[in-house]
Amino acid sequence: MSLRSPSPSDRDRRRLLKALPAAAAAFGLGRPGPVGAMAAEPTAALLKARLAEQGTGLVALQVDKSKVEIVAQGRAAEGTALRDDALLEIGSITKTFTGLLLADAVVRRRLALDDPVEGALPGIKLRDSAGAPIRWVDLATHRSGLPRLPANIAPRDPADPYADYDEARLLAYLREFKPTVARDTRWEYSNLGFGLLGYALGRAAGSSYPAQLDERVLRPLGMTRSTLSLPGRALAGLVDGHDADKRRVPHWHLDVLAGAGGLVMPAADLARYAQAALAPDSTPLGEAFLLAQKRHAVGPSEMNPIGLAWLRAPLNGRTVLNHDGGTAGFSSSLWLDPQRQRATAVIANAMVEVNDLALHLLDESMPAKDLSLMRQAAVALGAEQLAPLAGVYATRPAFKLTLSVRDGQLWAQATGQGAFQLFARSPRRFFARITPLEIEFAEGSPPASLTLLQGGATLRFVRE
């Protein structure tokens, strides 16, 4: 999940039907160095192939225990190559740092996960619909009942939507907050919740979130170039961000919601963080890393439980951890494989999808998406050809695809996801243009089933 603008974007819809709902010397990690088992050339070729389809620049990192490979391709700006030491926005990967800061406070017995958050707030009762206090763990697992964004966010500059959302506005929102659900009854991704978590952790320490993050996490891990993009702060070396059409967009700055997505850093710092997460006992935050990564609640699905921000997922008999990030001009994806002691990340200086690239680098059995599928030529079909295809198709009771015809176009909507248009290759085979995905209908009118093809995998849905 990512930190995007206050309005829903196509980025959220691109996540539908994913295979997986989605001081250095102080502790001896050493400086990132070459990895014999991971050649740079194949990684560079993978990035070049993706840049031929979309994006402006990509930086990939691969970690194998103490060894690191960092590869950059593309451009930072017109006429300027993107360097592997470029400073980049990592968006919502910041949430894992905020979760780690919470875990550190718990390990040091400054608070407990089940404690009420309102104890750190100035005269505000933060309760759920049943009147129970919202807890720290509820914020850190997206199960607080708080919405994705506060209702009183109204940026002066829509291109920098979080810059003027400050402490006063956050507290005003919380004083008027009317909960509609009980805490820990459903998972709802909340940038507001993680922004509040960071703010409250700062207050609980008698300090601020930026100061606590720097003191307790960044400096102990030797992440010397990592910092928060705060209002009024110019960051030397921060490269340009771009939209999906390769147009430059302004950088984002976050005030009181910085804990949800305000970090910027070079790939080497993110690699150091991944190394620490894979080998927590060798760091000053060992217990905190372990607490942050363990299962604490059900996440977006039963197979994707959540730690303190980290989403956990099954992969070829192992459990891997993931968090994605996104701002108006950057996209990122970080994966950890604790069992194999490997980690990968891909960061783009454009609003494009990178999750599949990072997952492929982690495990080659997970293919990168073939984006050329989205550029196929479509054929026109009449309403009489589309109408029989409409209906509800299920692969299991809880996961269904609803097909409908709107204004002469075929649309699909998966359970819990936004609708997306399908385009015809033939009367029985269709493709999407928001993600590499194809659907083939069985013979018959109406068809008894359909097959969804994505990333080398197939999934059969039966008509209800």
Image: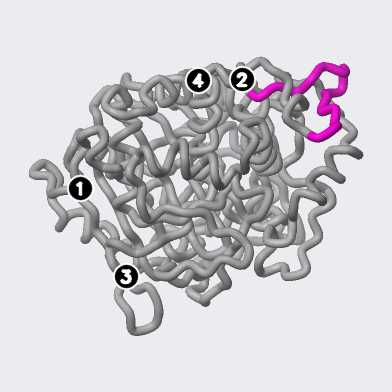
- Between the C-alphas of marks 1 and 4, the distance is 30 Å
Q: How is the image coloured?
A: one colour
Q: Left or right of 20: which side holds 401?
A: right
- Viewer-nearest of discs 2 and 3: 2
Number of residues whose C-alpha sits closer than 10 Å to that of mark 2, classed few (under 14), some (14–19) or many (20 or more): some
Name the chief secondary structure element in magenta: loop
Quadrant position of the C terminus in the picture: top right
Indicate which disc, 2 or 1, sits on the residue closer to the N terminus: 1
The answer, for residue 23, to whether it is visible in the render is yes
Q: Which residues are magenta?
A: 122-136
Q: Which mark is residue 82?
A: 3
Residue type at tag 3: Leu
Disc 1 marks which amino acid? Pro
For residue 273, above or below residue 264 = above
Q: Which residue is mark 4?
A: 108
Q: Is residue 157 left or right of residue 318?
A: right
> Real-space Cα distance between discs 2 and 1?
35 Å
Q: Nearer the viewer, residue 18 or 78?
A: 78
Label 2–label 1 contact, CB within 8 A: no
Secondary element at tag 3:
loop
Q: Position of residue 48 (x, y in %)?
A: 27, 65
User: Disc number at residue 32?
Assistant: 1
Amino acid on which the number 4 mark rests in the picture: Arg
Which residue carries the number 2 mark? 111
Q: Could you tell me if the residues under marks 1 and 4 are in contact, i.e. CB atoms within 8 Å?
A: no
